[in-house]
Amino acid sequence: MHYSTRLISICTISLFILIVRQVSANTNQIQWSGFGTVMASYADSNAGYDFGRIDRELSFSEGSLLGLNGSYNLEENWTAIFQLIARGSKQEYSTYLDWAQINWQISEDLQLRIGKQMWPVWMVSDHIEVGVLYPWIRPPLEVYSIQPLSTFTGLTLAKSFTNGEHSLLLEAYGGNALAESDPATPFGYPAYFNLDGNIESLRGLSITYENSWLMLRSSYATGNGDLTLKNLSLLCQPSCGTASANTPADFNLGKAEFTSAAARLKFKSFLIWVEAAETKSESAKLNKAQGSYITFGYRFKSFLPYITTAYAKNPTGPSSYLAGSQKSFSIGTNYFLSNSIVLKAEFNEVDAKAVNGFFENNLGQPGPQGRFARDPDSKVQVYNLALNFAF
């Protein structure tokens, strides 16, 4: 970890300690809220969908989580907020501090955020863990996993403009982001990948327009990436054997860029969600990845059925990692038990293909294909049930 990353991390931890000391004697003044998901998932393949998390063993822990938000008014126009998450996996539940920041409301339409905070690049960045606020069991992996980072540590200056029902939000930010395995990110690579690294000099701009029936968001970010996959053999078990055990794979990305665009339309009982994203870097090992999806839904009474089609394409070439493509079709429904409790069921059919991937060409063995831990060799059906709630 570089000096600037350590410095920002130390400042964030120190800031959070001061917050805790400040509010410890005034816990009754903290405003609390929370959310959670109880999920069951099953796939008709042992290829390991969602980078190995979902297979033929019925899982009630992968995807399940409990989140707790706290907000405390330090002084006039100064607010400390934080989020704790307990996330499930096949091994155990892990609890961690997702973000902790101080917000300075400079004026009615201008805000400065300081600390570890959400990265505003996705349509659902502000509530990426809160399942009651979007229709899917999980946001489409074809898009959301091409950039698994969800938080960064630094500064954000947010300026809003309002005219009647129309609002425009500009968010300019800078800082550093740590790339880690679970539980650090909801769409990151699982813990057995043993991923480590950081994105230095992260900076970007996000623009969001919203009215009563339409939401548009566009984002651009750039930084210098240095990632290491510490145990390459785990990506192609059991076929790699011991020859490549503990072999590191370096992703020295150099300059990396990320762009995304999204739209959400609500017309009477109909809804349409569409989003596309692309990452690029100077590294031949991961020089480009693209993903997109579109969702159609219709709300009647307490039900919201929907369909989603999604596509992802990773880089190709003899030195590319994770090369290939994936497309999926999903159909599901939401049943609203109340405004804050939603029962969901979803079926996914996923088709992943390799295209001259590193693991085929250089190791001579099958490796990860699409968003699977290894080649599924055919289309895979994934079945999900979830109960989302907020309080």
Image (spheres, grey):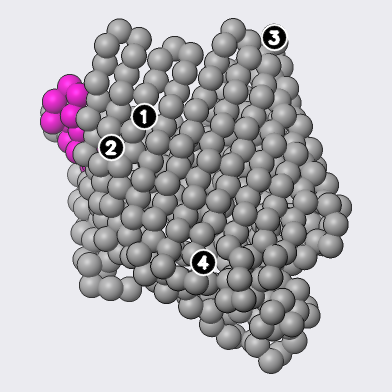
Name the residue carrying label 1: 208
Q: Nearer the viewer, residue 60 or 168?
A: 168
Mark sitting on residue 171:
2
Which numbered disc covers residue 264?
A: none
Category of crowding for the residue at label 1, using alpha-carbon neighbours closer than 10 angstroms: few (below 14), some (14–19), many (at least 20): many
- What is the secondary structure assignment of the residue under circle 2? strand
Q: Indicate the amino acid at tag 3.
A: Lys
Residue type pointed to by label 1:
Thr
Q: Residue furthest bottom?
A: 243
- Disc nearer the start of the sequence (1/2): 2
Q: Is residue 329 above or below residue 167?
A: below
Position of residue 370 measured from the top left corner of the image (x, y, whole percent): 68, 58
Which of the two labelled residues, at mark 1 and mark 3, occupies the earlier sequence position? 1
Q: Can residue 81 be seen?
A: no
Question: Which mark's residue is nearer the viewer, 4 or 3?
Answer: 4
Task: Calculate the distance from the C-alpha at mark 1 to the C-alpha at mark 4.
Answer: 29 Å
Q: CA distance from mark 4 to mark 2?
A: 28 Å
**At numbered mark 3, what does the secondary structure look like: helix, strand or loop?**
loop
Vertical comparison of 97 with 9: above or below: above
Left or right of 127 in this view: 193: right
> How many numbered dots are placed on residues in this image?
4
Tell us which disc is closer to us: 1 or 4: 4
Closer to viewer: mark 4 or mark 2: 4
Amino acid at dot 4: Leu
Disc 1 versus disc 2: distance between alpha carbons?
Answer: 9 Å
CA–CA distance in space, label 4 to label 3: 46 Å
Which amino acid type is marked by label 2? Glu
Mark 1 or mark 4: whose residue is earlier in sequence: 1
- In this figure, which residue is indicated by the disc labeled 4? 286
Question: Which of label 2 and label 3 is nearer to you?
Answer: 2
Give how far apart the Cα atoms at labels 1 and 3 are. Answer: 30 Å
